[in-house]
Image (tube, rainbow, N blue to C red):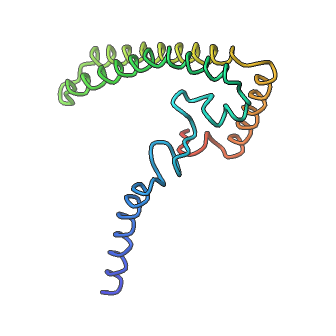
């Protein structure tokens, strides 16, 4: 019995300490394993895509300018949505259900989602307009391959939800 208890404690200690050690070494983090995030801050046309598409310096400058124009807009919408959610959660009273308040909150969140979706689509369209026809074709082929790979895995990748 004592040997089993020691084994359980050792496993628990390893499972508790290992993630902290890995994060301290930079193995895991906000930008993925070994600091190589799947996306740069815009979610597309990051450094890996810049090299993949062989973007010119002029194209990279245009893309950065477009990103910089949309970032404050998207950040403001995300912050407004987060603030509305926090205010709703603070006022939430499980013992006193108010359907009208819940509906109003859900509708306000839907408005933020719509605005975020529209602005992300505008950003993507403007970024796409910077590309040459060959780059657009290369990007379309890459997207098709990624979609096919994701389909074979049965989801969107790590953490895919159904």
Q: Residue at x 75, y 33 (%)?
A: 142
Q: Is residue 100 left or right of residue 61?
A: left
Question: Which corner quadrant of the image does residue 52 belong to?
Answer: top right
- Residue at 45% from the left image edge and 47% from the top image edge: 29
Residue 142 or 114: which is nearer the viewer? 142
Seen from the viewer's position, the closer of residues 55 and 46 is 55
Q: Is residue 66 left or right of residue 102?
A: right
Q: Quadrant of residue 127?
A: top right
Residue 97 % position (x, y): 23, 24
Residue lying furthest front: 57
Splitting the image into 4 quarters, where does residue 1 fall? bottom left
**Is 133 located above or below residue 55 in the figure?**
above
Compared across the picture, whether 5 is left or right of 133 comes to left
Say above or below: 65 vs 37: above
Quarter of the picture containing the C terminus is: top right
Position of residue 68 measured from the top left corner of the image (x, y, whole percent): 50, 18
> Residue 45: where, in percent of width, then height?
63, 28
Name the residue at 22% across, 26% down.
92
Q: Position of residue 40 (x, y in %)?
A: 54, 33
* 1 over 157 or under it: above or below: below
């Amino acid at each position: 019995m004592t040997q089993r208890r020691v084994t359980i404690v050792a496993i628990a200690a390893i499972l508790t300490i290992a993630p902290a050690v890995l994060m301290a070494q930079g193995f895991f983090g906000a930008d993925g394993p070994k600091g190589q995030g799947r996306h740069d801050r815009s979610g597309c046309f990051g450094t890996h895509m810049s090299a993949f598409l062989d973007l010119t310096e002029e194209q990279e400058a245009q893309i950065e300018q477009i990103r910089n124009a949309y970032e404050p807009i998207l950040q403001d919408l995300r912050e407004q949505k987060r603030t509305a959610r926090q205010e709703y959660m603070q006022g939430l009273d499980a013992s006193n259900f108010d359907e009208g308040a819940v509906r109003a909150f859900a509708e306000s969140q839907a408005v933020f989602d719509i605005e975020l979706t529209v602005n992300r689509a505008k950003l993507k369209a403007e970024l796409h307009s910077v590309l040459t026809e060959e780059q657009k074709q290369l990007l379309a082929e890459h997207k098709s391959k990624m979609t096919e790979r994701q389909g074979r895995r049965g989801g969107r990748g790590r953490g895919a939800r159904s």
